Amino acid sequence: MTTFSPTLFSAKRYAVVGLGSNGLPAARFLRSMGAQVVAWDDNPAVRAAAQGLELADPTQYPFDYDALVLSPGIPHRLPKPHPAAERAIAAGVPILCDVELLFHAVRASGSRARFVGITGTNGKSTTTALLHHILDRAGIPAEAGANLGPAALSLPLLPHHGVYVLEMSSYMLERLAEMRFDAAVMLNLSADHIDRHGDMAGYARAKCAIFDRQRSHHLAVIGIDDPNCRDIAAWLDTKPAHLVRISGAAPGLTRGPALPGEHNAQNAAAATAVARHFGVSDDAIASALQTYPGLPHRQQCVATVDGVSFINDSKATNADAAERALVCYDRLIWIAGGMAKQGGIEPLAPLFPRIAHAFLIGRDAPGLAATLAHHGVPFDIPGTLEAAVPAAFAAATRHHAPTVLLSPACASWDQFTGYDQRGDRFAELAQALSPTHLAPTHLAPTHLAPTRLAATPSRTGGA
């Protein structure tokens, strides 16, 4: 495989701030391509682990850089800009993400490899991995990364017919300058990351940047299962790219066993639209959909004990994401909680009749409990996964519920380093269960619902 030239960026000077999973690979890549790189992280321990880099706080010197590469998690505007971002803005220095630099590196190397950007409030990781799987099975050189998996500047140089499949967060999209996507996908849009974008309009503007600079030979794919994206679709009708609308409710959609639920039908439709754009046949797409293995922490069955399935959907960090899981099960035990997003779990009320019993963990469990009590859903507040998992197992047997679902509808940072650690811990606890855990637990229901209602259909939603 062709490699990037070690002199590709020899005339460039960059400040890289934030040496985590994106920043450290970016600093090392730029340095290996001949750029002068000043790297910094506010955490001394992280700086100590950054071997071989020139470490200096760029705010302490004249800000004469070609660009500031700021890790996605560090704000440059709201809620408060990082000092390096303030210096960059004052000096007129562009603030970029690593995906922008990958685009420049690929084009400067002479490759015409295609770029796919995939975004949305929910479903973008699954769609990214699924499209990569389809292209790989079709024999097209492809690499997946950015917000999912390897950092963008960890990816190799692809040939002209290769495809970069990049999951794009709103944080990354607002730091693009010249990049254009050959195919851009917006799956859905609901309130999230308002602290970083100010309001829903600001969040939508950041997400819509995925369609910027597209031309007539490019593809724009938009989900139409939520009102925000339907509005964006009308706007895209005025743009030059070829527009494809997708819906998880469309009849006849093909998907595989690792893609349950209407939301995954939408994910499959998005991946199918892009694969077709790159010339993959429908037969090859259908075959790849059947062999797609799924992603960890996204409706992943991690254990089955005495007929009870334990489903790890830890990636569901907001109510919209949790809805996509809840709708897949007629009767279940639900484990939820953590750091609640705006609106909490009230939007999930139409699905509450499916819940035989809920177990709440984390910082905002009391607030979630108030919502459940208002709707007559029985619940306990064990507080931790260690207490919740065996209690949920006992409740599943008691209520003849075949599924224990971890779909927290909340962020994880109050108790875990991320949703992945939360999901891994859930899997460990589920796999350690045995029939002895069927004995009654010490937990008494905090609230018991009166008459149970029949399961209700979900409202239509995106991925």
Image: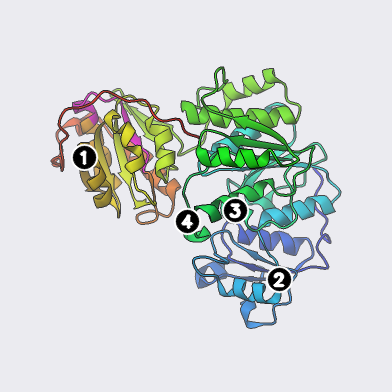
| Lower position in the chain sequence, tag 3 or tag 1 | 3
Question: Which disc is residue 379 wearing?
Answer: 1
**x 74%, y 64%: residue:** 31
Q: CA distance from mark 3 to mark 2?
A: 20 Å
Magenta span: 396-408
The label nearer to you, 3 versus 2, is 3
**SS at mark 2 in the image:** loop
Q: Residue at x 23, y 29 (%)?
A: 435
Mark 4 or mark 2, earlier in chain: 2
- Give the numbered dot on residue 194: 4
* Residue 288, percent from left and from top: 63, 24
Q: Is residue 18 above or below residue 255?
A: below
Question: Do the residues under discs 3 and 2 have CB atoms within 8 angstroms?
Answer: no
The answer to whether the residues at label 4 and label 2 have Cβ atoms under 8 Å apart is no
Q: Position of residue 383 (x, y in %)?
A: 25, 49
Secondary structure under badge 3?
helix
Disc 3 and disc 4: Cα gap in Å? 11 Å
Residue that mark 2 sits on: 93
**Image quarter (top left, top right, bottom left or bottom right) of the N terminus:** top right
Residue 358 included in the magenta stretch of the image: no
Q: Amino acid at mark 1?
A: Phe
- Residue picked out by circle 3: 206
Q: CA distance from mark 4 to mark 2?
A: 25 Å
Sooner in the amino-acid sequence: mark 1 or mark 2: 2
| Numbered label tally | 4
Asked whether residue 53 is in view, the answer is yes
Crowding around mark 1 (Cα neighbors within 10 Å: few <14, some 14 to 19, many 20+) is many
Q: Is residue 432 visible?
A: no
Name the kind of residue labelled 4 in the image.
Ile
Query: Quick one: label 4 or label 1, which is nearer the N terminus?
Result: 4
Q: Which of disc 4 and disc 3 is earlier in sequence?
A: 4
